[in-house]
Amino acid sequence: MKPERKFWQSALFWNVAPILAALLFTTLLMLAVGAPPLRAFAEILQGAFESPQKWADVAMAWAPLALIGAGMSLTFAAGLWNIGAEGQMILGAICATWVARNVTLPQPVLLGLIVLAGLAGGALWGLLTGSLKVYARVHEIFAGLGLNFIATALIIWLIFNPWKPERGATMSGTVPFPEAAWVPRLGNTRLAPLSIVLALIAVLAAYFLLKGTRFGLELRAMGKNLRAAFLQGIPTQRHTLVAFAICGALAGLAGALQATAVYHRLIPRISGGLGYTGMLVVILANYRPELVPAVAIFFAAIGVGSPRLELNLQLDASLGGVIEGTVVLFVLLGAGLRKRLGGVRPSSTSEGS
């Protein structure tokens, strides 16, 4: 007869307790600086969902996070840290910008080319990260960070040199794209349905690849034990390159959509830290693509609602980032503590669905 599990050993406890601990920590932090915690949380929620326009803003902030999170679920499944999503976003945006500036076609065809250009640019940058790891033995974290710096330098050079406006280059970016290169919006809102549809397709595709294909099974085997996977005949180097290419392609698509659906131009901070935030999304989703959409909504809502803290409570909007980071930190601490205490084994992408 199996011994009865205590509540603290249950999966429910270890899934909920870290989030409650993070909220408690954030509450104490706000009390320490003299801010009303309940009102601050209420202001963030109201700022994110008070009107149809705000709902649209949350949806548009959700789309790139879902795209990046879906891609990173593949690299994390293989035990790979793709820190280079920022650079992959930038390359996707750059390639999409070239198409938007230089190609004249009917809007549906042009938008299709822009999507393909974003996918190709991000895939190329992701493949470069994977190649540095596979062939040059450079750890993917350092390779990704280095390529992020190169991509950032490249986008600034393009905006301030060959693509600078006639009136002179500024941080506002290039001149607006032709309207044919703008992703259509819904009514008077900032919601571009194409971005949402592509993000949902990416999440479904990532889930299918991981849970329904031999490739996904072999990626998860690599994540469990890379050497054992290699000895079993799994082409680990090829799978590493493919995982980075797919992840980079989705990040590049996110960059292309930021340029054509949100800003309608290329700006120096086109990635806006979304590559790093996307990594937090997939970590909080326990590396499972099916949970990425819900977690991405949480991050998107905080990002859209946080500026309201400055307007009504004179609190810096960066408090939203503190909340996001604290939740992720406590979830990671909870997972580590659960393993040390011998509680319920943490689920991961290396397990079955």
Image (tube, rainbow, N blue to C red):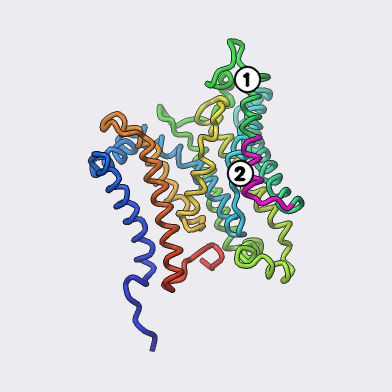
- The residue wearing badge 1 is 160
Residue most extreme to the front: 32
- The residue wearing badge 2 is 84
Q: Callout 1: helix, strand or loop?
A: helix
Vertical order, 157 against 69 (above or below): above
Which residues fall within the magenta stretch? 137-150
**Where does the image place residue 34, in percent across and percent down from the top left?**
23, 39
**Horizontal side of residue 168 vs 297, given as left or right:** right
Mark identifier at residue 1: none
Q: Amino acid at mark 1?
A: Phe
**Horizontal side of residue 302 vs 81, given as left or right:** left
**Where does the image place residue 276, in percent across and percent down from the top left?**
52, 43
Vertical order, 331 against 233 (above or below): above
Q: Are marks 1 and 2 in contact (CB under 8 Å)?
A: no
Residue depicted at 47% across the width and 49% down the height: 281
| C-alpha gap between disc 1 and disc 2 | 23 Å
Residue depicted at 51% across the width and 40% down the height: 274
Residue 4 falls in which quadrant of the image? bottom left
**Horizontal side of residue 70 vs 231, given as left or right:** left
Residue depicted at 62% across the width and 20% down the height: 160
**Where does the image place residue 263, in percent across and percent down from the top left?**
51, 27
- Residue 258 in view, yes or no: yes
Crowding at dot 1, Cα within 10 Å, few <14 / some 14-19 / many 20+, comes out as some
Instruction: Check residue 146 for magenta coloring.
Output: yes
**Horizontal side of residue 303 vs 158, given as left or right:** left
Q: Amino acid at mark 2?
A: Gly
Q: Callout 2: helix, strand or loop?
A: loop
N-term-proximal mark, 1 vs 2: 2
| Magenta stretch: dominant secondary structure | helix
Instruction: Check residue 288 for magenta coloring.
Output: no
Vertical order, 163 against 48 (above or below): above
Residue most extreme to the top: 167
